[in-house]
Image: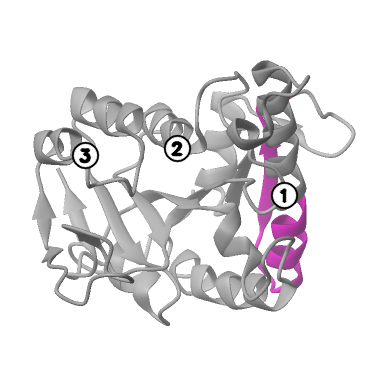
């Protein structure tokens, strides 16, 4: 049985949601290997302390289903293409993590037995209990569901303590901080506030509604700042907490 070396007030099992945009790093699209190595080292710090880490990856750096649907491409087909994009990201990220000495398993909610393990609840739990980082591809495996909603769904299924949504900004603001210097950051938000405010678009409303229904907290934070993943897991005041 894995012995945990967790510090006080830290989470034992977390889900980290990483967008395809973040995996593109310094590029407009595609996969940034150097950024992935940096991310692996950040995750390794917490994994070595005994924190169980589940990672849900997006695929927007390759294909966004909602954007390419139309002009002959059905929405269901477009969403399937988006799921395949998440699998490409998950495979690449798994290799990078393994190259950094992190025990990692790639699991998929779409049928891809030749390249990834099927996501099975008990199997994922066993991997986590053995100290392996689990990287999940394919979202829920169903169309019309974003990877944000899939992330909350997976966190609930695997009994995670919190959903950590990695972004390029340090939290949720009342308006776009990149365009409005006077934008004000929220330290905390209730689910209801996040759902009712149309200006808050950091996570889709279906994901927020699911989190509210099952009372699991979401932390929106800047994952590009060194040490922030560890600080978030240790319960420090980073980003915006929705609960």
Residue at image location 24% in from the left, 65% down from the top:
239
Front residue (pair 24, 165): 24
- Residue interval drawn in magenta: 91-110
Discs 3, 2 touching: Cβ within 8 Å: no
Secondary structure under tag 2 reads: helix
Give the Cα distance between marks 3 and 2: 21 Å
Residue 222 versus residue 111 in the image, above or below:
below
Query: Seen in the image, is 165 located left or right of residue 217?
Result: right
- Specify few, some or many for label 2: CA neighbours under 10 Å numbering under 14, 14-19, or 20 or more: many
Q: Earlier in the sequence, mark 2 or mark 1?
A: 1
**Residue 6 shows up from this direction:** no
Q: What is the total number of numbered labels drawn onto the structure image?
A: 3
Badge nearest the viewer, 3 or 1:
3
Q: Earlier in the sequence, mark 3 or mark 1?
A: 1
Residue 232 versus residue 52 in the image, above or below:
below
Badge nearest the viewer, 2 or 1:
1
Residue corresponding to mark 3: 198
Discs 2, 1 touching: Cβ within 8 Å: no
Image quarter where the C terminus lies is: top left
Front residue (pair 173, 157): 173
- Specify few, some or many for label 1: CA neighbours under 10 Å numbering under 14, 14-19, or 20 or more: many
**Residue 12 shows up from this direction:** yes
Residue at image location 65% in from the left, 70% down from the top:
36
Give the Cα distance between marks 3 and 1: 27 Å
Residue at image location 72% in from the left, 56% down from the top:
94
- Specify few, some or many for label 3: CA neighbours under 10 Å numbering under 14, 14-19, or 20 or more: few
Residue corresponding to mark 2: 151
Residue 144: % across, % down: 53, 20
Residue 179 versus residue 108 in the image, above or below:
below
Residue corresponding to mark 1: 62
């Amino acid at each position: 049985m894995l012995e945990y070396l967790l510090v006080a007030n830290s989470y034992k099992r977390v889900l980290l949601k990483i967008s395809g945009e973040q995996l593109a790093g310094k590029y407009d699209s595609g996969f940034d290997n150097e950024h992935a190595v940096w991310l692996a080292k950040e995750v390794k710090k917490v994994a070595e302390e005994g924190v169980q880490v589940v990672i849900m990856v997006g695929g927007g750096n390759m294909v966004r289903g909602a954007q390419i649907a139309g002009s002959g491409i059905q929405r269901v087909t477009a969403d399937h293409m988006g799921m395949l994009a998440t699998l490409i990201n998950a495979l690449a990220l798994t290799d990078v993590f393994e190259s950094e000495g992190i025990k990692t398993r790639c699991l998929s909610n779409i049928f891809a037995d030749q390249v990834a393990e099927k996501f099975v609840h008990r199997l994922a739990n066993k991997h986590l209990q053995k100290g392996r980082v689990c990287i999940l591809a394919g979202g829920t495996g169903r169309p019309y569901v974003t990877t944000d909603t899939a992330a909350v769904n997976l966190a609930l299924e695997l009994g995670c303590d919190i959903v950590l949504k990695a972004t390029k900004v340090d939290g949720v603001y009342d308006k776009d901080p990149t365009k409005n210097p006077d934008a004000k950051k929220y330290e905390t938000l209730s689910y209801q506030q996040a759902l009712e405010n149309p200006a808050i678009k950091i996570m889709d409303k279906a994901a927020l509604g699911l989190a509210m229904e099952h009372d699991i907290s979401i932390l929106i934070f800047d994952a590009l700042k060194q040490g922030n993943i560890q600080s978030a897991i240790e319960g420090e005041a980073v980003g915006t907490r929705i609960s």
